[in-house]
Amino acid sequence: MNWLKKDPRSIRSASGLEWSLWRRLPAIFAWGTALPALLLAWSWWSSGADQALARDPDAMLREFVLIGVIVLHWTLVLTLAIGCAIVLLMKGPRYEADPYPLPDADRPRD
């Protein structure tokens, strides 16, 4: 059984926005993670590591928000990557499925 039998009459659709986004995803991921991470590192170092118990609540809130921004960015990039992959697969060549004999092919129901 041939799992990936391409249909000889199929055509590939023209590439569009999905390929430009797919190529830029590593840079989008890296820059979108690095910028808030640098702000987070600056916030940690400016508040002082030795004063962990007596920290400023505003600084802690700012750090939690920055961590949330980083995680939100990761989920957005993952969602964008899944969307690009789906569009790339849909625009690719068509594959033939194995024939499936219908049990009521000789007497179809009304």
Image (cartoon, rainbow, N blue to C red):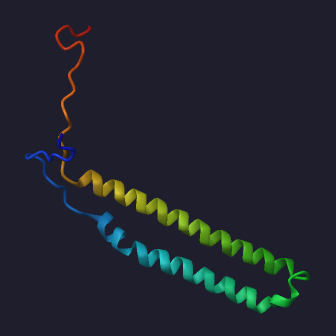
How far from the left and from the top, in percent, is residue 23?
34, 73
On screen, 32 above or below 75? below
Foreground pick, 69 / 103: 103
**Residue drawn at x 12%, y 48% as measured from the top left:** 10
In this view, the residue farthest toward the front is: 1
Picture quadrant of residue 95: top left
In this view, the residue farthest toward the right is: 54
**Residue drawn at x 87%, y 87% as measured from the top left:** 51
Foreground pick, 85 / 17: 85
**Residue drawn at x 47%, y 59% as measured from the top left:** 79
On screen, 44 above or below 91? below
On screen, 68 above or below 56? above
Residue 62 lies left or right of residue 98; in this view the side is right
Quarter of the figure with the C terminus: top left
On screen, 22 above or below 88? below
- Counting the numbered discs, the total is 0
Residue 33 lies left or right of residue 13; in this view the side is right
In this view, the residue farthest toward the left is: 8
Picture quadrant of residue 47: bottom right
How far from the left and from the top, in percent, is residue 65?
71, 72
Picture quadrant of residue 18: bottom left
How far from the left and from the top, in percent, is residue 20?
31, 71
Residue 29 lies left or right of residue 7; in this view the side is right
**Residue drawn at x 59%, y 66% as measured from the top left:** 72
Quarter of the figure with the N terminus: top left
Residue 96 lies left or right of residue 48; in this view the side is left
